[in-house]
Image: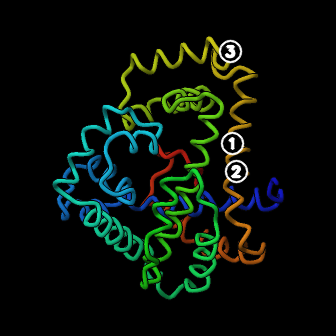
Amino acid sequence: MSPDHTVVIRARELWAVLEAVHDVTYFTPQARAAHEAAGLRGFWRGYVATRAAPLGAVTLGPVVAAFHNFAPSFLARTVPAIWAVVPPEQALTARLAGAVTALREHLPGLDREPLAEVVSVLWRIVRSASWEGRPLGAANADLPEPEDPVAALWLATTALREHRGDGHVAVLVAEGIGGLEAHVLRDAADGSRDLVLPHRGWTDDEWSAAHARLVERGLVADGLTEEGRRLREHIERRTDELAAQAYAAATEAELARVDAVLRPLAKRLAGGAVPYPNPVGAPAP
């Protein structure tokens, strides 16, 4: 059964808010410093290892499958060799420490915010959500809830962020849209190629081939075709619906309260710690 339309809208609105909180792990010097102190030298080794670490010391295949829109050759530079240098448990510790340090430094007074009630609602959602077919989300949800409220906030936003991402990948796969083709389809709508391509490891030739496949399907010409626009709208709508299923454990009043507390903080992060636009593709909060 499809979730209530109000919850679907709320889930999309909260996506931008939760994403900003989560994204400090990618864009802040505090997170980068924590990753490098653990032995994860270089931005992309830190990104791939810390994001994949909840899955354990997996081989390349599961990471390619879960990440979806990265070139396999790009991910192969990090996994599985990185686990001999920095085991997943160590990468997870560095990931959380860097995110918490970043949040506290970029949001002075964060500990004085009414975090307890927000964290309580978010973790109730995490614990009651269905994680079937959502490997990255489930792996994060399976981690222990931290006692520190800022750490608990970050991990809950991360689990829900990956819950949505896993659902998005499922919809793309169902519609026959590969990881690179998803980028090309987005570029046809918003011209994001130069923002995305350097950060996902695909070559110009691979991009051109994916573009040709979408042209052959009638989805792309000079920009999106009408069929391409309808497909993209369907993908976004279905992603929202799948994400909304997680929020059934909270009332609308509770979700509104989460939004009211976190959105001002997310906007402060978007003013400096997290750049917009960025390759992640989420809207600014």
Amino acid found under the numbered disc labelled 1: Glu
Asked if residue 214 lies left or right of residue 63, the reply is right
**Vertical side of 206 occupied by 114: above or below:** below
Picture disc at residue 177:
none
Amino acid found under the numbered disc labelled 3: Gly
- First reached walking from the N terminus: tag 2 or tag 3: 3
Question: x, y percentage for residue 100?
Answer: 38, 73
Q: Quadrant of residue 243?
A: bottom right
Residue that mark 2 sits on = 240
Q: CA distance from mark 1 to mark 2?
A: 6 Å
Question: x, y percentage for residue 221?
Answer: 64, 14
Label 2 residue SS: helix
* Residue contact between numbered discs 1 and 2, judged by CB atoms under 8 Å: yes
Asked if residue 218 lies left or right of residue 25, the reply is right
Q: Residues within 10 Å of mark 1 (few under 14, many from 20)?
A: some
Amino acid found under the numbered disc labelled 2: Asp
Residue that mark 3 sits on = 218
Label 3 residue SS: loop
Question: x, y percentage for residue 213?
Answer: 56, 15
Residue at the spot 57% in from the left edge and 42% down from the top edge: 169
Residue that mark 1 sits on = 236
Q: Nearest the camera: 265 or 259?
A: 259
Q: Quadrant of residue 73?
A: top left
- First reached walking from the N terminus: tag 1 or tag 3: 3
